[in-house]
Image (cartoon, rainbow, N blue to C red):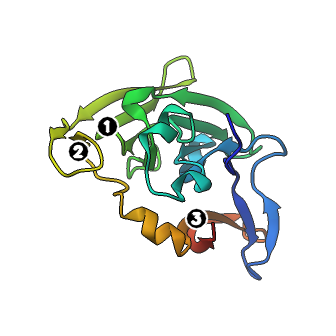
Amino acid sequence: MQDMFLSGGFILLDGETFEVVGNWELPGEAAPFGYDFWYQPRHNVMMSTEWGAPKALADGFSMEHVKEGHYGSKIHVWDWTTHKRLQSLDLGEEGAIPLEIRFLHDPTATEGYVGCALQGTVFRFYRTPKGDWAAEKVIHVPSKKVEGWALPVMPSECVWKKLMGEYCRLGIHLTLPVHIEHLELGVATRSIIKWKYQI
């Protein structure tokens, strides 16, 4: 696979000065196509998702780029304390381009959901009785045959229209989730920053 800037690490900022401290994950542990994350400190776990290689977006969304492996289909499981990647759950074609991920709104929960853009699916992820993690498809919204669309079938969730190519020529605006640690307080927060990627 050609490298299209696919590394997806997490930026760690100082909670008081907002200066970049470094990467949150351990060296060599960055997952490809980094997108969203959510964590449950009580269970010492963080989950993250994959999107796509920024350069693959330059001319708009292309199924060829999906087939060539420039978009992700995995959920990554991280140790919250050590910042080590423990497990990667491959959701397959039905789970291609997993984006927003959330645990249940219960700090004791060991399960949650992720929306997968390409096939209009939702997967439930959960900790198994053995202590590892698994995922299962729980929702699928069928696609619809249409005319005048970029593809012969419109996915149930329209992610990137052909028009996005025009926006990309002006520069891609990405939303990056950022993990900020308040080092003295021992508290972590989840923030969002905007970043412009110029092709």
Tags 1 and 2 touching, CB below 8 Å: yes
Task: Tell me the residue at 31%/37% (across/down).
Answer: 119
**Front label number (3 vs 2):** 2
Task: Tell me the residue at 60%/66% (across/down).
Answer: 189
N-terminal-most mark, 1 or 2: 1
Look at the picture and state if 110 lies above or below 13. above
Q: CA distance from mark 1 to mark 2?
A: 7 Å
Which quadrant of the figure contains the N terminus?
top right
Q: Which mark is residue 156?
A: 2
N-terminal-most mark, 1 or 3: 1
Look at the picture and state if 56 lies above or below 77. below
Q: Which mark is residue 119?
A: 1
Query: Image check: 22 left or right of 113?
Result: right
Task: Tell me the residue at 28%/41% (across/down).
Answer: 120
Task: Tell me the residue at 70%/52% (across/down).
Answer: 9
Q: Position of residue 66 (x, y in %)?
A: 48, 37
